[in-house]
Image (tube, helix red, strand yellow):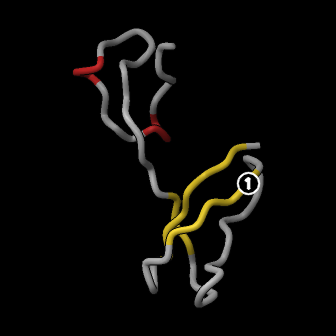
Amino acid sequence: MALLTFVCKNCGHKQEELVRSTSPAPRCSECGGEMKQCFSGKCYGSIGGTASECTHHCATCSGCKK
């Protein structure tokens, strides 16, 4: 399970949700609209690459170095 931030496509409301990888996208708690995942934070370098190679799109990344 992961704590992810979502933003509403209709009203722009942001909310955090504890979700499983198989969970459907949550609905907005303000207007009931469709939510999309909001990526935030910093990238410090990806596995097998350098920070300059980071696409800043975590969904397609193999992971960051610790």
Hey, which residue is sitting farthest left in the picture? Answer: 52
State whether residue 28 is above or below residue 65: below
Q: Position of residue 48 (x, y in %)?
A: 40, 9
State whether residue 31 is above or below residue 2: below
Indicate the quadrant containing the N terminus: top left, top right, bottom left or bottom right: top right
Q: Give whichever of 29, 48 is nearer the camera.
A: 29
Q: Give whichever of 55, 51 is nearer the camera.
A: 51
Determine whether the residue tagged by mark 1 lies in a helix, strand or loop: strand
Query: Which quadrant holds residue 57?
Result: top left
Is disc 1 surrounded by few (<14), some (14 to 19) or many (20+) residues within 10 Å?
few
Residue 7 lies left or right of residue 43; in this view the side is right
Q: Position of residue 50 (x, y in %)?
A: 30, 13
Residue 20 lies left or right of residue 31; in this view the side is right
State whether residue 20 is above or below residue 30: above
Query: Which quadrant holds residue 28?
Result: bottom right
Hey, which residue is sitting farthest bottom in the picture? Answer: 31
Residue found at x 55% / y 57%: 5
Residue 52 lies left or right of residue 41; in this view the side is left
The number of numbered badges drawn on the structure is 1
Residue 1 lies left or right of residue 45; in this view the side is right
Residue found at x 52% / y 59%: 37
Q: Position of residue 17 (x, y in %)?
A: 68, 59
Residue found at x 43% / y 78%: 12
Q: Position of residue 52 (x, y in %)?
A: 22, 21
State whether residue 46 is above or below residue 41: above
Residue found at x 47% / y 21%: 64
**Residue under label 1:** 18
Q: Give whichever of 52, 14 is nearer the camera.
A: 14
Q: Amino acid at mark 1?
A: Leu
